Amino acid sequence: MLRQANSQLRRYAIAAGSVLIGLLLSYGLSQLATFDRPFLLFLAAILVSSWYGDRQTGLLSLGLTLGLSGLQIWWPLSWLIFPPLASLSTAVFVLEGVAGSHLIHSLKHQADQAQQKLRVSQGEYNRFLDIANEGVWAIDRHQKTTYVNQRMAEMLGYPVKEMLGRPIADFMDAAGRAAAQPHLINRQQGLREQYDFRWVRQDGSDLWSLMSASPIMSATGQFEGAIAMVTDISDRKQIETELKESEASFRRAVVNAPFPIMIHAEDGEILQISNALTEITGYTFADLPTIQHWVQLAYRDRSQQVRLDISKLFGLAQRVDEGEYKVQIKNGEFRIWEFSSAPLNRLADGRRVVISMASDVTERKQAETALTKRLKQQAAIAQLSQQALIKSDLDNLFDQTTQLLAQSLEIDFVKVSELLPEGDRLRLRAGVGWRAGLIGQATLSANRNSQAGYTLSVKQPVVVQDLRHETRFTGSDLLINHHVISGISVLIEGVAHRPFGVLGVHTTQPRTFTQDDINFVQTVANVLASALERHHNEKKIQQLNVSLEERVSLRTQQLEELNQELQAFTYSVSHDLRAPLRAMQGFSQALLEDNHEQLDSLGKEYVTRIEQAAASLDQLIQDLLTYSRLGRTDICLQPIDLNQIVEEVTQLLAADLQTTQTHLVLKKPFPSVLGSYRILVQVLANLLSNAIKFVAPDVNPVVQVWGESYGDRCRLWISDNGIGIALQHQTRIFSPFERLHGVESYPGTGIGLAIVKRGVERLQGQVGLESQLGQGSRFWLELPLAH
């Protein structure tokens, strides 16, 4: 009820106020002579009352106006009562007032409805912005925040209320404010744009955003502010930063790589090269803008083929080894590179990219070439050394030497110059490359003014880089006429400290000879010197052989004469010396038999001693004859069964074996050997006889005989339990007349083991023993087996 009363009172106040204002204005304007339409002011008051009140308020204002005119209290309203137009004017005024009130009311109603719809729409839009996933930020012309949605506030970490009214510069650092200034200028100029921008969050961290900004302009084109959609791209920026860092790291790795690297696109652009490529080639990145520049600089006449090879790389799906390429660097030298390439990711513009890497194998290839060259030279030296050993024709050897040198060093000229007996000239003995008719005819000066003469003088290898600029000597006519420039010359040693001559190699192009080349030429010269010495020695040997044959023939004749004399002496010893001995033995025995009773014990002892001495001397003569015959008898080796030899020897020594009570152990069977039956019987008999004889007193001999075979040899062992032989005597006992004991202790001639040694050696065998003093002996005979 109260609300209705207040509303009614409000309408009265608006109507009264409007009419009063119109009355005052009409009175004030009536003072002007030109103002004659006061009704317009009251009509305006009616319309204002209707707009700010309602239709009833407008009608009330119309009634008040009519009431004032009826009371005629104010002259400005007199126009309403002057006849004859008073009734018509009033009617028109009333109609206008009523119509105006209705019209204004209708318009206000429509405006209120439109305003209501606008408020509803604005609310919905604001709710949409508040729940949007993107930030929204609006500023006025002074760059102060007029609106931010919840998302925008969350992105910066502020409450919405704290952001409203604040300048956007509060959310930037110094760098951000500088970066934002050009964009704000663009807004003021009415431009829209999209760009990346960095804000500062409340916690001090960076917020990278994608700004889609638009200006807010008035109807007259004046800048009123701006609004922007803000998208959080911090994650993308982080990825981009990491990607850039990765790319930067990759580029640093490429640039600082210790080997040549080039990254190039399919349109020919070179994107990156390593420092190593520049260091090796001398070409900088500025020198190589495109692959065409690289190919032209590095490959020259081969550039077309190389470009074709490079174009194929962009179809690769994986790494490929391209092989070796010869690259020319900036200073004109050539390097050998081993290339491999692999595809990379496409560029942002879609171009395919390839990374090509190279390994500089120049030194390795040079080493391989040098090794191949050295092996070739060594093979040539080996071949030449072999030929030097088997060839007796020096001219043939010299020809082969010059050809091998020319092939191995790949040079134009080779010569062997022989120093003539006079010593002042050298003759071209052999060579390769020289004009026809010069070999064997041309001569050179041997003084220091020529290369060959200088070599003879210094006796060291002489290397010439360029004969045209040589200061040590001048070139000979032979070298100058053949346009020789570079070369090596070495001395060929001769016989009796006199040089044979000079070996030279020469080229018509400048060439730098390596130490290996010099050593090779010197080695060849040494081989020739050895061949010359061998040739000289062969001549001497031939002469010595002739002399030796003459001396051998003479000595053979002398030996035959001596042998005849020795045979005569042997016959004389065998018959003439033994005859008196047999007489002494015979008379001694007769004396004992015939005069046994007349002789006292001393006489009988003397006669017995004479008989024993004669027997001993006779045995010695027989042994000497046996030893002598072993050295002179022709022996034909044939298979011998050792079982038969052992059987015969045991029969020969049966009496001694029984007398001495010897225990003989024969470990049969025995193998067959190559030898002489008679000599083997004599050797084995001597060894068994010694084994029975040389035992300690009151000890029964124990003798063992056995055989061992190994390979193509047989060893026959004779072991005893005798007195043994000291180590220092084990060699001398095989010499003639060497006795370790007196005849009174162990009888014998001292020549038995000498006969054993000579007999075994004549059978191409060996004899030896193993013994210790007081522990017996083991003699062995080693002979070839009979197959």
Image (tube, rainbow, N blue to C red):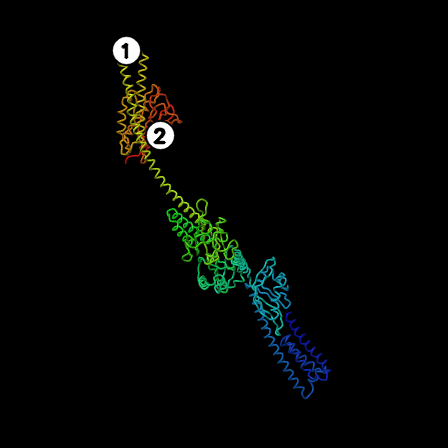
- The C terminus appears in which quarter of the rendering? top left
The image shows residue 619 at horizontal and vertical percentages of 30, 23
Residue located beneath label 2 in the image: 768
Question: Going by the image, does 380 lie left or right of 618?
Answer: right
Give above or below for 569 relative to 501: above
Amino acid type assigned to the residue bearing label 1 in the image: Glu
Q: Secondary structure at mark 1?
A: loop
The image shows residue 517 at horizontal and vertical percentages of 46, 51
Number of numbered discs visible in the structure rendering = 2
Question: Going by the image, does 354 lie left or right of 144?
Answer: left
Residue located beneath label 1 in the image: 597
Q: Secondary structure at mark 2?
A: strand
Give above or below for 765 relative to 199: above
Whole-angstrom CA distance, mark 2 to mark 1, is: 52 Å
Who comes first in sequence, dot 2 or dot 1? 1
Give above or below for 675 relative to 80: above
Q: Nearer the viewer, residue 553 or 768?
A: 553
